[in-house]
Image (cartoon, helix red, strand yellow):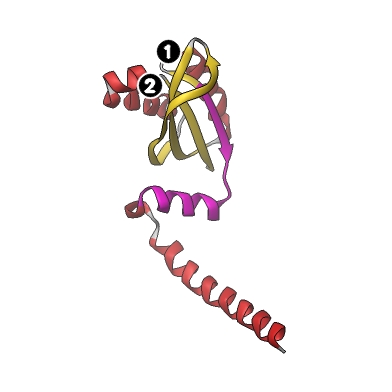
Amino acid sequence: MVNYEGMFLLDSGKFAADHEGTIAHLMEILEKAGAEIVAHRPWQDGKLAYEIEGHMKGLHYLVYFTMPGSGMEVITRSCHLSDIVIRQLVIKQPQTLFDAMVTAIDPSSAPEAVEESDNSETAEVDADYDAIDDDDED
């Protein structure tokens, strides 16, 4: 399973009319591709810089999920066929960045093992910075 970040530009009019149905439609597209949703949330709703397929406004929706790489074709095809998804961008994320972003979006979904390992890594990094700071003062 690969970690992915997906930014989906949704029709803001349809989202305003039925936000639960719009989110369910997007989650259905991802689950059909074999994705396991880890965290998701609306990111930004507003005027677009330029018209896209007749839309002057859109809602950016951020989703973090894991999925086999073969599911990308299904997501791309389903988004092109959807009347709710205007555009999509999906990128792979390294585990550390993926965990940090998921924690920022939904702190309750943060894995406990990552928090423990982050504390030990932070102590090591702080020690390195202290050593660098001591050298600079001399």
The quarter of the picture where the C terminus appears is bottom right
Q: Position of residue 75 (x, y in %)?
A: 51, 24
Q: Residue at x 68, y 80 (%)?
A: 132
List the single residue furthest toward the top.
Answer: 54
Q: Residue at x 34, y 27 (%)?
A: 23
Asked where in the image residue 16 lies, by quadrant, the reply is: top left
Residue indicated by mark 1: 83
Residue indicated by mark 2: 12
Between 117 and 126, which is closer to the camera in this rendering?
A: 126
Q: Residue at x 58, y 50 (%)?
A: 94
Compared across the picture, whether 7 is left or right of 40 comes to right
- Above or below, 123 against 6 in this view is below
| Disc 2, SS | helix
- Above or below, 130 against 58 in this view is below
The reply to whether the C-beta atoms of the residues labelled 2 and 1 are less than 8 Å apart is no
Q: Position of residue 127 (x, y in %)?
A: 59, 80
Is 8 a magenta residue? Answer: no
Between 32 and 23, which is closer to the camera in this rendering?
A: 23
Q: Position of residue 93 (x, y in %)?
A: 57, 45
Compared across the picture, whether 50 is left or right of 44 comes to right
Asked where in the image residue 58 lies, by quadrant, the reply is: top left
State how far apart marks 2 and 1 are (Cα): 12 Å
Span shown in magenta: 87-106
Q: Three-letter amino acid code at disc 2?
A: Ser
Between 110 and 43, which is closer to the camera in this rendering?
A: 43
